[in-house]
Image: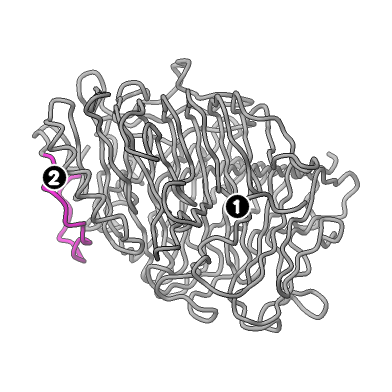
């Protein structure tokens, strides 16, 4: 196929010169083979991390838990001017703080904020979580907009390609206000690690900021459990996954737009001449939405743990199932960066769950999960950094695990793995679910790891994962932020939705478990091989695959799987194959097509040449 207008270069490289773009998108690529607050902690071992210099925190009542620095709890009774001042100050601190240590959560108690005549509108910067505290999205209504716009790195270079690490969840936006080009539109111009979940938008939504100077590129993205009563403009979004949502209109695609269990989604048309790159699944095979913090009818703090759904379509909150677990916050250790990891692990071992409040946690040992049905929930993008070459999270009992809302950075001492999900066979009726787990090697600081995320347990759902070897920031270079593999799966019955794995130096995803499923995979090969000799499996096997199934895999299904390359070191680099599939009777691929630009020497072959084992 040819690149559809607008032709979008590889993410985050707009300001860089050189390097050809090669994109391989495999859509409908079905490969089938037969077959409460914590007790007082000991003195901290390190000072808490910095938080942004913003307006004073909104006061909380004595009955509320200490949710940590950087958490702002709003109530409809508060003057709107006070709320506006606070959210604007947070945005001013966070909009350009791509690798800063500020972490923020803006939490809205049930009620209505703003009005059509006096809307509440604000921007969301880096490491900022915006969430309602109701049990359903309609409990919190914002008349106005909650926006993410392009960042203008130069007068002629306004982009959303680096708009990572922020989120919006569990509220209703009744779109109001705005001026000029941005009148009456909710803008969510984001890239990876910026999920929108459990949101209801009444009015127009745009996933592209078309109101600045160009080129206005975006590279998302993930939406789940949401509903839109107005049209959604995809615009320049190179790829996007919309899961278990409700749409009334979707404008277009660029490379790879995937819909699963989404009512009103466009029909599959990927690969059809002149058609949009849409891949649509009528139902989502197995899913469970991310746990979320809320207050109940008595204003007590609770955590909702949504139930597992199978073969589902549409948002889960539109019909009450009564099956969700609701846990009192008293059953959680509420941790801060000053909480020693041994205190966290003792709490987990004795049956409590873990709420990680905003900040950067420098860990001397892994957070260890040893009991089934454990919830580890991040608030305001807590960031875990192992400092002694261990994992950041080690799971020994995966059944029913919910791990959500965390960033994991590789540390200064090389780790074998950053997040290790083990614990045996698991249970189909009670799968482990990882939601919004974002792994990073370099960017904030130099780090090294062999494999970022390892899944050896069976019956695991990966729901919005970004595993990123940084291509920019601090501690970046071929021999600096070394990392071989972004994801390794050896467990059976592992399902991934919105799997983003980028820039690793060897095979980026290695999958040897049976009955695996991936719905929307986005990959970029490493930008920075200094030579072909530095990046090849051997003579005649140039480069490394983006995704490789082991020869023993008998059954695997993949939809909307894409790999792109942008080699930017000014030397000729070639990749022999993007996807490796076992030559197993019945293994097949449907609607697979290369999409490339051949401005310079770089290559990815079509599926018919994709390294069958």
Q: Give the residue at mark 2.
A: 57
Which of the 4 image quarters holds residue 486? bottom right
Relative image position of residue 59 (x, y in whole percent)? 10, 39
86 falls in the magenta region: no
Q: Mark 2 vs mark 1: which is more N-terminal?
A: 2
Q: Which mark is in front, 2 or 1?
A: 2
Name the image quarter holding the C terminus: bottom right
Magenta span: 38-58
Which of the 4 image quarters holds residue 102? bottom left
Of 408 and 222, the residue lying toward us: 222
55 falls in the magenta region: yes
Q: Is residue 32 left or right of residue 393?
A: right
Is any part of residue 310 visible from this angle?
yes
- Disc assigned to residue 456: 1
- Disc assigned to residue 408: none
Does the magenta stretch mainly form a helix, a strand or a loop? loop
Residue drawn at the location 17% of the way across and 53% of the way down: 41
Relative image position of residue 455 (x, y in whole percent)? 58, 52
Residue drawn at the location 62% of the way across and 81% of the way down: 570
Residue drawn at the location 8% of the way across and 34% of the way down: 62
Q: Is residue 294 left or right of residue 464?
A: left
Residue drawn at the location 78% of the way across and 43% of the way down: 271
Cα separation between marks 2 and 1: 42 Å
Relative image position of residue 307 (x, y in whole percent)? 48, 27
Mark 1 neighbour class, 10 Å CA radius: few under 14, some 14 to 19, many 20 or more: many
| Above or below 64: residue 33 | below
Of 240 and 404, the residue lying toward us: 240
- Residue lying farthest front? 180
| Above or below 296: residue 99 | below
Of 575 and 321, the residue lying toward us: 575
């Amino acid at each position: 196929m040819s690149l559809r207008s607008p032709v979008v270069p590889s993410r985050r490289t707009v300001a860089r010169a050189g390097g050809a773009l090669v994109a391989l998108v495999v859509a409908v690529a079905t490969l089938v083979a037969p077959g409460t607050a914590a007790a007082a902690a000991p003195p901290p071992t390190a000072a808490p991390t910095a938080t942004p210099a913003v307006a004073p925190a909104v006061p909380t009542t004595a009955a509320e838990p200490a949710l940590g620095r950087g958490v702002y709890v709003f109530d409809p009774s508060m003057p709107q001017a006070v709320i506006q001042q606070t959210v604007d100050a947070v945005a001013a601190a966070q909009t350009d703080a791509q690798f800063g240590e500020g972490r923020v959560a803006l939490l809205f108690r049930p009620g209505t904020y703003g009005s059509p005549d006096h809307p509440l509108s604000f921007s969301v910067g880096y490491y900022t979580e915006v969430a309602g505290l109701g049990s359903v999205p309609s409990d919190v209504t914002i008349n106005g907009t909650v926006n993410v716009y392009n960042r203008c790195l130069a007068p002629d270079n306004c982009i959303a390609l680096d708009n990572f690490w922020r989120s919006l969840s569990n509220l209703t936006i009744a779109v109001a206000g705005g001026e000029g080009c941005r009148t009456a539109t909710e803008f969510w111009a984001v890239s990876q690690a910026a999920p929108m979940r459990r949101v209801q938008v009444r009015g127009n939504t745009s996933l592209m900021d078309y109101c600045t100077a160009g080129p206005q590129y975006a590279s998302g993205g993930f939406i789940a459990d949401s509903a839109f009563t107005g049209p959604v403009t995809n615009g320049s979004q190179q790829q996007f996954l919309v899961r278990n949502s409700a749409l009334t209109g979707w404008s277009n695609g660029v490379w790879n737009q995937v819909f699963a269990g989404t009512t009103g989604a466009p029909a599959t048309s990927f690969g059809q001449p002149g058609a949009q790159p849409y891949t649509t699944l009528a139902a989502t095979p197995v899913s469970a939405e991310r746990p979320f913090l809320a207050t109940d009818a008595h204003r007590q703090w609770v955590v909702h743990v949504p139930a597992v759904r199978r073969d589902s379509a549409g948002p889960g909150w539109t019909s009450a199932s009564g099956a969700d677990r609701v846990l009192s916050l008293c059953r959680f250790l509420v941790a801060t960066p000053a909480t020693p990891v041994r205190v966290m692990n003792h709490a987990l071992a004795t049956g409590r769950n873990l709420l990680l409040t905003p900040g950067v946690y420098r860990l001397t040992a892994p957070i260890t999960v040893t009991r089934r049905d454990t919830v580890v929930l991040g608030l305001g993008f807590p960031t875990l950094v192992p400092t002694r070459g261990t994992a950041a999270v080690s799971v020994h009992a995966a059944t029913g695990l919910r791990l959500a809302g965390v960033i994991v950075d590789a540390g200064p001492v090389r780790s074998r793995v950053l997040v290790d999900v083990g614990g045996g066979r698991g249970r189909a009726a009670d799968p482990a679910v990882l939601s919004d787990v974002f792994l990073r090697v370099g960017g904030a600081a130099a780090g090294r790891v062999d494999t970022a995320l390892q899944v050896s347990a069976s019956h695991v759902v990966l729901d919005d994962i970004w595993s990123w070897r940084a291509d920019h920031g601090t501690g970046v270079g071929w021999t600096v932020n070394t990392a071989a593999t972004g994801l390794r799966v050896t467990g059976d019955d592992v399902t991934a939705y919105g799997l983003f794995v980028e820039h690793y130096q060897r095979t980026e995803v290695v999958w040897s478990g049976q009955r695996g499923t991936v719905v929307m995979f986005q990959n970029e090969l490493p930008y920075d091989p200094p030579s072909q000799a530095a990046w090849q499996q051997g003579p005649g096997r140039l480069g490394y695959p983006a995704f490789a199934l082991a020869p023993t895999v008998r059954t695997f299904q993949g939809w909307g799987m894409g790999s792109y390359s942008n080699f930017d070191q000014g030397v000729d680099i070639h990749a022999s194959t993007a996807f490796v599939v076992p030559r197993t009777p019945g293994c097949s691929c449907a609607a697979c097509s290369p999409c490339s630009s051949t401005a310079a020497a770089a290559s990815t072959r079509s599926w018919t040449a994709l390294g069958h084992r």
